[in-house]
Image (spheres, helix red, strand yellow):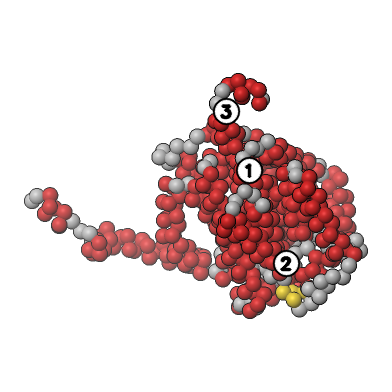
Amino acid sequence: MNSKATLLHQPSGSSILSTPLGWIIMIGILVVSFLLMKVMGIMGGALLIGLPVAIVVLSIIWNNPKLGVWGNILMAFFSAGIARYVPGPWGLTLDILLALSWLSILLNKAVKPNWKHAKNPIVALSTFWMLYLVLEIVNPSGNGLVAWFYAMRGIGFYQALTIPLVFILFRKEKDLNQFFNVLIYFSLIGTIWGFKQQIFGTDGAEDHWLYAENHHEEHILHGVLRVFSFYSDAGSFGASQAMMSLMSAILFMGPEKGWKKFKYLVFAIIFLLGFAISGTRGALAVPLAGGIAYLILIKNFKILVAGFSGMILVFIILKYTFLFQGVEQVRRMRTALDPNNKSLSVRLDNQKTFAQYLATRPFGGGVGTAGFWGARFNPDSLMANTATDSWFVKLWAETGPVGLTFHLVVLGFILGSGGHKIMKMRDPKNRTQASALYAMLAGAILASYGNQVLIQLPTGIILNMAIPLMFLIAERDQKAWLKSIKKPSELKGLL
């Protein structure tokens, strides 16, 4: 029998199911499906449905690890919203996508990373910070390994995984442009969804989240909805929208011309409106600190004076007048400047409580002992029953004065080094784009004094990419300048 005849007689497609091997495979699948459904219930069924999708995602990321990082941004925006309609551990997809990217880089021989790109102070600092968090596992005051695992992800794990990946994989200018576009269009979807809630009200799944899961007290004030869109809460939505408005405004002030320049202005206004309907007071710090940082970076005295004058005018209107008092969002922002605000006094009392508790604990109460995870794993503890509110208070409580100091040093180095590099940039477009990323970071850091902005989704994940991209812009700008020097004598004179 020739080869063609052999091929024609080989079982294929549905005919394989009639063979003994086919029956064994079918029975095996049925047994595994039965066990999963019996042990895990609906979750087991969801796992079976998602398994083919997972295999496809794995194969895609295996050949292109960069897509795992893009997928991470996607899930950072939409995972909280998806969970309201399809309950499940959607937050873990961020870990999985980053892990798959790393597995592809480490195990796939077709992917050939240049490891020298990851040899820089930013990667080193994020790694050392993660190592400090690992040492917190043995903190005698901690809640155990499981609580530590859940809590450390946003504090340092995502950062330690993402920053080296960006330095290795996102080195082209088109990667930066795609990053800006992804942020703008995902955020725009969030704004549209937010206005849908504002105008038409919340749907059934959102009502369940508000009332059955007891989120209505913080999101419905005096009968007015604090819009949360598909984000985890109104605070996350407001901070993200404020950051996107700041970024778009800075890109608008760059060298772009025509429709592209006008587009950034439109986006800045849209995201500012999204921030307003969230009713988030703490996010006021994002445009405030970010705007000041940008004005300092550009070293333009006239714009600096005009910018400070505008900020002072807004402050005076909110602090000393009743203008626009009929607008609920303005009324709520105005309370952030009231020194007699009850919320502020409660926060100060909580900080005194932490100070007494941490007096004999230089390494804190342990990662996963405060806030949401503390309430889940040890609800009767002092740490779980004392609100942290601020990102820095949370770190102070969980990692102690030592951990907080370390973290502030890392942030200070990034701001100091990044600002120095931006001021030395020669290309206006590079300087504008890097300044937008820098301002976003500066604004989020100041806003984190009142809220946990640096750990919120999608803001925290966005900044994990923004930090290395900012330094990559500086690197490209430096290389372009060196190429423009025609004679070694010119270079010597400029240096």
Give the spatial CA distance, label 2 vs label 1: 31 Å
Residue occupying the point 84% across, 59% down: 313
- Determine the residue positioned at 87% across, 61% down: 316
Q: Nearer the viewer, mark 3 or mark 2?
A: 3
Expressed as whole percent of the image width and height from the top left, the position of residue 188 reads 60, 64
Label 2 packing within 10 angstroms: few (<14), some (14-19), many (20+): many
Query: In this orientation, which residue lies closer to the viewer: 166 or 272?
Result: 272
Tell me the element at label 2.
Answer: helix
Q: Earlier in the sequence, mark 2 or mark 1?
A: 2
Residue at which label 1 appears? 428
Instruction: Say whether residue 185 is visible.
Output: yes
Disc 2 marks which residue?
276
Secondary structure type for disc 1: helix
Find the distance from the CA under tag 3 to the CA under tag 2.
Answer: 48 Å
Question: Toward which corner of the image does residue 474 lie, by quadrant?
Answer: top right
Asked whether the viewer can see residue 456, the reply is no
Name which residue type carries label 3. Ile
Left or right, 330 with respect to 457, comes to right
* Residue under numbered circle 3: 485
